[in-house]
Amino acid sequence: MSHATANKAILENAYRRWNETRGDSVEELLDICAEEILWGSLAGGVKPLAFTAKAVGKSDVRNYFEGLLAAWSMNYYNVDYFVAEDDRVVVVGSTKWTNKQTGKACETPKTDIWRFRDGRAIEFFEYYDTAQILDAAKP
């Protein structure tokens, strides 16, 4: 099995569990990350999405998930396809979350780009509709 195929299989399982558990598989996601992972998000920590600030290391990534799940509840996370080449895997799909404070839902296309080394994720960056998310977070 090539590294690209193995990395894709890791993420196929992780995203399946993420959707099935509606966000209750954080430990499983952290298990695929290297200690020194770099984690980025399109919102870049803008208020009220402070948890989306650049994260360096598993501890910071854990804080990202704690902030996400404290403020939002997942409705679904669907993956349309995975594209794997060399050390990168691109995940394309859509997701819907509800803000716990405002009760507003946000549905957005979602693309995640992962980079692996030796079977562990070392980089992650997510793209989504920040305008919709910010709107759903405003009281």
Image (spheres, rainbow, N blue to C red):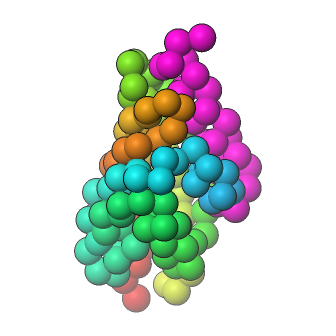
Query: Relative to the observer, which residue lies in front, 111 or 41?
Result: 41
Q: Quadrant of residue 114?
A: top left
Query: Relative to the observer, which residue lies in front, 58 or 92?
Result: 58
Query: Relative to the observer, which residue lies in front, 91 or 109?
Result: 91
Q: Quadrant of the C terminus?
A: bottom left
Q: Is residue 15 left or right of residue 47?
A: right
**Residue beneath the point at 54% across and 18% down:** 5
| Residue 15 belongs to magenta span | yes
Q: Quadrant of residue 10?
A: top right
**Residue beneath the point at 44% across and 23% down:** 83
Query: Relative to the observer, which residue lies in front, 86 or 82?
Result: 86
Above/below status of 21 relative to 9: below
Tell me residue 126's x, y (percent): 37, 49
Above/below status of 128 relative to 48: above
Question: Do we see residue 103 in this rendering?
Answer: no
Seen from this angle, which residue lies furthest right? 20
**Residue beneath the point at 36% across and 75% down:** 49
Q: Which residues are magenta?
A: 1-24
Q: Is residue 76 left or right of residue 42?
A: right
What secondary structure prevails in the magenta region? helix
**Residue beneath the point at 44% across and 34% down:** 116
Tell me residue 9's x, y (percent): 61, 26
